[in-house]
Structure formats: structure tokens, C-alpha cells
Image (cartoon, rainbow, N blue to C red):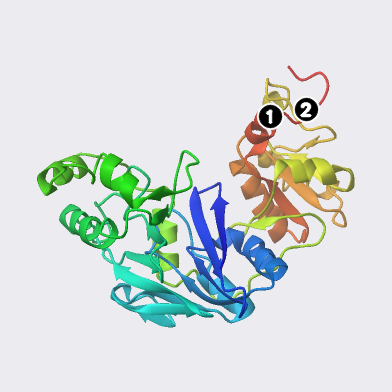
Amino acid sequence: MIFRQLFDPVSSTYTYLLGDAESGEALLVDPVYEQVPRDLALLQELGLRLQTTLDTHVHADHVTGAWRLRERCGSRIALAAVVGAEGVDLPLRHGDRVSFGKRYLEVRATPGHTSGCLTYVLDDASMAFTGDSLLIRGCGRTDFQGGSAQALFTSVREQILTLPDPCLLYPGHDYRGITVTSVAEERRFNPRLGGDVDLGDFAGYMHNLNLPHPKLMAVAVPANLRCGKPEGEAPVQESPDWAPLTLRFSGVWEIEPMALLEHAAGLQIVDVREAPEFIDPLGHLPDAKLVPLSQLMARIDELDRERPVVAVCRSGVRSAQASVLLSKAGFDKVANLAGGMLRWKAEGLPVAPGSR
């Protein structure tokens, strides 16, 4: 079997590729919308055909790539039937199987983080994909989308921690860079659900987390109830060829700092911060042109419409807006610097001489 664990640094989401080498059939668990070009490239390189995408639940922190992948390669979309999402091809229930070649994943209902959480167990019980139901030394929250501490406690104890001790558990996220755990480890060391913890202990802990809602919840949940399909009928634009770019669900193309450094000679770099920020301790990119966002539309004729434009600001927020304004003004080769000058500086890339 072919197995790959992939990572989205923005949402700290793990996506899992499972392929049957003999038949060439493959599955993707928890694909991320912005990472679809990456996933398609990997499938092509490994000679695999994507049969099905499976989401472990309706995510609140990122948009699924399920619809976008189906548009590209005809894969089926699988999600818990109880969710009632629009566009699902395989509404899954406890005990179902999703096949790829001679292998399959068994579906286990593990509600509690949300009402529609599923865990996928490989046919030989050597690995399971737990989504947010069970994280490494933790678990998902239980305070929205039909969540229930009691339900989650029961799900984990009866459907996940009853798997064989050596079974490897792969979570939906990890914010520390840890990639995998096991049933034996979590049964012994998970501070919320392992050891001698009982329902009263667990419920008391979960009811007092007092966490803020995920920042993208208002966008991600409605989008994921459409299986990641954008609103309206606009087709998804594939990646431009003038630089390696990533399309965000907002419709803004982003370029990573290292990619910008490699392609800078052929680009117009427009810094949309205010003038004092241009020479502050963050500095500015070599050859960047200062055009504050507040002046961008008035000075738009200073830019060459035939050359690609990369917008830059401190964190990537104002420059994302600049990218939208430029696109609406007819610039068809526009991208935003991912993470802005904060990310550029953190990666140790060069700033213009004379910046403090």
C-alpha cells in the first residue's frame, strides 16, 4: 500500500493519501481546498487515480478540497450521512466500507466533537484516521456543531481505544508537528481520555475550556456543507504559469516567500503599506515600489498591466485586499505575498539595503 501524510501549514491540517499500488486506485482523507494542486501533482507522480475523498467531519477551520477534486478527476465525495451536506456521493454510516483496489477503510461513527464525526480504520486495523475525535494527547472541542462531551467520551473509548494496541492513529490536526500516535500510547497517556479518567472528569474538563470559535468558522462550515463548492457558478481557475501560486478559498492567489525570491526579476513588487512602514525595522523587499493601499486606485496607471504584480504588506491582509482591487481593475496576473513582510523576515530572506 502507498501511504503519504500531507500537511497544510495554514490550518495545521493533515491530509492522508492511501493508494493500492496494484490497481492504482487511491483515497484522500481530509483534503484541503488550497492544497488541491499539491494533491493532484502527487497523485500524478505516483501514478494513482483518485477514487474517493473522505472527510472525517464538517471542518470549522478550513475548507475541504472534496468538490474541487471531483471537478478535476471525477472522484466521489464521502461524508457522514447524518450531516446532510449538499453534493455528497457516498453518505456514510457506521459499518460502511470505502474501497480502493483490494484495500478498504471501515467507517466508524465517532460523534462528539461534532455530530457527524467519523473515524476510518484500515482493513487490517494497522492504522486509523481519527479526525478531531482523538488528537495526539488530546481531542477536539465539544461546544459547537452538535458536539457532546458524553458522546465523544463514549466514541473514543468504544470505537477507537478498543482497536489493537499497535494500531497507529493519525489525527486531523497537530499544532506541534507530531505526526502519529498509537492506541496503546493514547490509552495510557492521553490526559483527557486515557488512564483512569471517567466521564465526569472528562465532561468537567471539556465544559471549562472556554475557547474562542475558530476564526474561519463562519466561512468554512457553510462551504463544507456544500462539500467545498464555492458560492455561485464561477469555475475554479487553475494555477497560473508565471510563478508557483496557491489559490486561497477567498479567490486570492498567494506566492510563498522563497518562490517570490526566485521569480522576483520578472515581477512588479508593490508594497501597499504606509510610507513610514516601508522603512521600519521590517524593511522592504529589494526593488519594491511603495504604493499605499489608500492610494492604489489613484496611482494604478503607474503599474504595467502586462507584467505580473505581487502585492506585499506587513502580514498579508492589506495586500490581499490590494490583490482583489487590482484583479477587479483588470490586472490578470496578480498574487499576494503569503504572510507578508513578517513571514519574509522570519525566513531570513533579504531586505533592501538601508532598512533598519
- Mark 1: few, some, or many residues within 10 Å (few <14, many ≥20)? some
Q: Is residue 215 above or below residue 83?
A: above
168 versus 90 height, above or below: above
Q: Residue at (32%, 58%) from the top-left corner?
A: 164
> In this rendering, would 16 be left or right of 138?
right
Q: Quadrant of the N terminus?
A: bottom right
* Callout 2: SS: loop
Residue at image point 16% right, 42% down: 196
Residue 125 image offset from top left, x and y in percent: 38, 65
Q: Position of residue 183 (x, y in %)?
A: 33, 52
* Amino acid type, callout 2: Val
Residue 229 at least partly seen: no
Which is more toward the observer, 60 or 206? 206
**Near-viewer residue (205 or 305):** 205
Q: Is residue 134 left or right of residue 112?
A: right
Q: CA distance from mark 2 to mark 1?
A: 8 Å
Categorize mark 2 by other alpha carbons within 10 Å: few (<14), some (14-19), many (20+).
Answer: some
Q: Where is residue 119? Give x, y as percent.
A: 35, 64
Q: Which residue is mark 1?
A: 345
Specify the quadrant that holds the C terminus.
Answer: top right
Q: Is residue 242 left or right of residue 255?
A: right
Nearest the camera: 19 or 233? Answer: 19
Contact check, label 2 and label 1, Cβ < 8 Å: yes
Residue displayed at 81% across by 36% down: 288
Residue 268 in view in this figure? yes
Q: In which image quadrant can residue 84 be found?
A: bottom left
| Callout 1 secondary element | helix
Question: Mark on residue 351?
Answer: 2
**Which image quadrant for residue 60?**
bottom left
Classify residue 46 by image quadrant.
bottom right
Kindly identify the amino acid type of the residue bearing the numbered disc 1: Lys
